[in-house]
Amino acid sequence: MTASSQISPSDGPTPRAGDAHVTALARALLDWFDSRERDVAWRHERDPYRIWVAEVMAQQTRVGTVASYYARFTERFPTVFALAEADLDEVLHVWQGLGYYARARHLHAAAGQIVERHGGEVPSDVEALRSLSGVGPYTAGAVASIAFGVAEPAVDGNARRVISRLFDLERSTPARLDTLARSLVDAAVDRPAEMNQAIMDLGGSVCSPRRPACGDCPVSSGCRALAAGTVALRPPRREPRSSPIRTAASAVVWRDGAVLFVRRPERGLLGGLWDFPGTKPEEGPVAPGDAGLVEELRDAHGIVIAPLEPAGEAFARIRHAFSHFHLELVLFETRWISGKAGSVDDQMAGSATGYAWVTPDRFEKFAVPAYLRSPLRSLGQGAR
């Protein structure tokens, strides 16, 4: 390694594609990638639409988990047109279980934008991709490089870790990471897709966060963090955020053998999903027979209910972890007395109004938060 190819950990000169260090890294990464033949469901896909769906699904989710959801989603929505024309309810239902539902809502919205602006063809231009709902730098780079061969980096969490260690970065700023990733993509010449995937694969299988297998790494000889003994410090650790406990109360409102579902607002936590009506999560305990729940149903939904009863033991209290807080949800059962919320006789009237009366045999047709699955099973078994 020549002196000119050395860069300082955080703000030294930027390496370019012709840099000896970068060229050696790129060659070794591509050779390693070519030898892997990793079995990923969409690895050999050439349809830009399917590549886009796969990349969105794989964000914040293990690749092994995505495969069955990807197959189900693309079978139901095989084209951009099919996704754009679908009802959001159905999209969320097919997505159910994969989490981070904002991704599904953005996919649905972006499909409509692709049809309207680009005639149903996923654009190859990076800026056009970035203009789509929910598409950020990573997704745009992944789709542009993998689907169209555009020399554009795609920096996800795995790539951030790999690049931070290869170049021993004290500060992993987005701009610095983009510059270094771009130098590797440029060094790959006509193989930007393989370079992006090689970096991500390395981070997912070898260059792990806590116990990286440096002895198995194809670029260990050029890893500056390994040479400096700073692998454990790269990338710089973010201060862990505390996860407060928030409590809420919800009501299982019965009416003629059906339960009231309320659609959550599209923007915000679990947007667009169906849920039981209830109070907003707040810090502090939920009191037995919580009066705030009665008031919430009356004030927010215009519904008058019978006195609250403790829910069945099988589902009376739910605990669920979100990314930024822990939810403790207390369920009560009650009966509808009067107010809006449509008619039980017209089960799908609520799809347009934000309310639906649902009989237990139809629970599974509604996209609901993961924490309601167990209560709904219990309700189905002991329906009134």
Image (tube, rainbow, N blue to C red):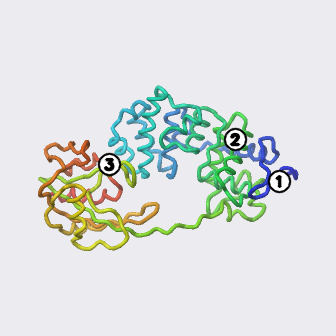
Give the structural element (helix, strand or loop) at label 3. Answer: loop
Residue type at tag 3? Ala
Position in image of residue 202 (x %, y %): 64, 51
Position in image of residue 130 (x %, y %): 55, 39
| First in sequence: mark 2 vs mark 3 | 2
Compared across the picture, whether 268 is left or right of 47 comes to left
Foreground residue among 27 and 277: 277
Label 1 crowd bin: few (<14), some (14–19), many (20+), radius 10 Å: some
Figure quadrant of residue 224 = bottom right
Q: Which residue is drawn at 67% across and 47% down?
A: 178
Residue type at tag 1? Gln
**Which residue is at the far front?**
299
In this rendering, is residue 192 above or below 207? Answer: above
| First in sequence: mark 1 vs mark 2 | 1
Label 2 crowd bin: few (<14), some (14–19), many (20+), radius 10 Å: many
In this rendering, is residue 28 above or below 114? Answer: below
Compared across the picture, whether 199 is left or right of 335 comes to right
Label 3 crowd bin: few (<14), some (14–19), many (20+), radius 10 Å: many
Position in image of residue 286 (x %, y %): 29, 71
Q: Name the residue under label 2.
A: 185
Quadrant for the C terminus in the image = bottom left
Compared across the picture, whether 95 is left or right of 213 comes to left
**Residue 145 marker:** none
Foreground residue among 19 and 304: 304
Q: Mark 3 points at which residue?
A: 367
**Which residue is at the far top?**
119
Q: Residue at x 25, y 43 (%)?
A: 351
Q: Mark 1 points at which residue?
A: 6
Residue type at tag 2? Val
Give the structural element (helix, strand or loop) at label 1. Answer: loop
